[in-house]
Amino acid sequence: MTEATIDDLRVLRFGSFTSVEGTLTVFPDTGGLSLDMPIRRVFAVSGVPPGAVRGNHAHRWCTQAVVCLHGSVSIALDDGQRSTTMKLDAPGSGISIPPGIWNTLAFEGPDTVVIVFCDQPYDEADYLRDRAEFEALKRP
């Protein structure tokens, strides 16, 4: 796990174009250069009831770029010492979360959709789901 801190978070903004036909959000260079990482896995989260949370974990090795496609989600981010909350509420708004940052996504509307780009394939061993274990690993 990297020694990532809140200072290592990176705000992402992708181009979005809205017209009467809807919104087109462009993710330039799907090879990963626009995200500064290779893309090994992509998933979307939708249908989450308002007020419900997802995430609530950290990763040992995986960097994730969480992007809001529709609706609004607040992401609580914590490095074990400091924390911050970021609201994603515009098409193409996102945050790049390095390994070692605890994240909890609070969905604020019934139609919120987020897409997540990962630099690692799925591996259950990558997940830190126990807060006490996370804090022990982050302790100086």
Image: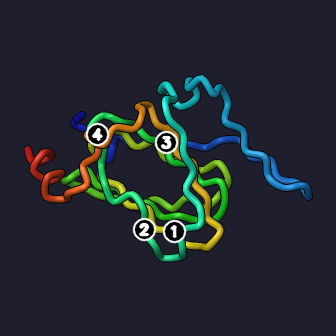
Q: Are marks 1 and 3 in contact (CB under 8 Å)?
A: no
Extreme right residue here?
20
Q: Residue at x 46, y 37 (%)?
A: 118
Secondary structure type for disc 3: strand
The quarter of the picture where residue 10 lies is top left
- N-term-proximal mark, 4 vs 1: 1
Q: Is residue 10 visible?
A: no
- N-term-proximal mark, 3 vs 2: 2
Residue 74 vs residue 48, the one in the foreground: 48
Left or right of residue 91, residue 37 in this image: left
Left or right of residue 119, residue 44 in this image: right
Counting from the top left corner in percent of width and height, residue 57 is at 31, 54
- N-term-proximal mark, 4 vs 3: 3
Kind of residue indicated by mark 4: Asp
Q: Are marks 2 and 1 in contact (CB under 8 Å)?
A: yes
Disc 2 crowd, CA 10 A, few/some/many (<14, 14-19, 20+): some
Q: Give residue 126's mark.
A: 4
Can you tell which of label 3 and label 2 is closer to the viewer? 2
Q: CA distance from mark 2 to mark 1?
A: 6 Å
Counting from the top left corner in percent of width and height, residue 67 is at 56, 49
Q: Give residue 107's mark.
A: 1
Q: Are marks 2 and 4 in contact (CB under 8 Å)?
A: no
Query: Badge 2 is on which residue?
Result: 53
Q: Give residue 65's mark.
A: 3
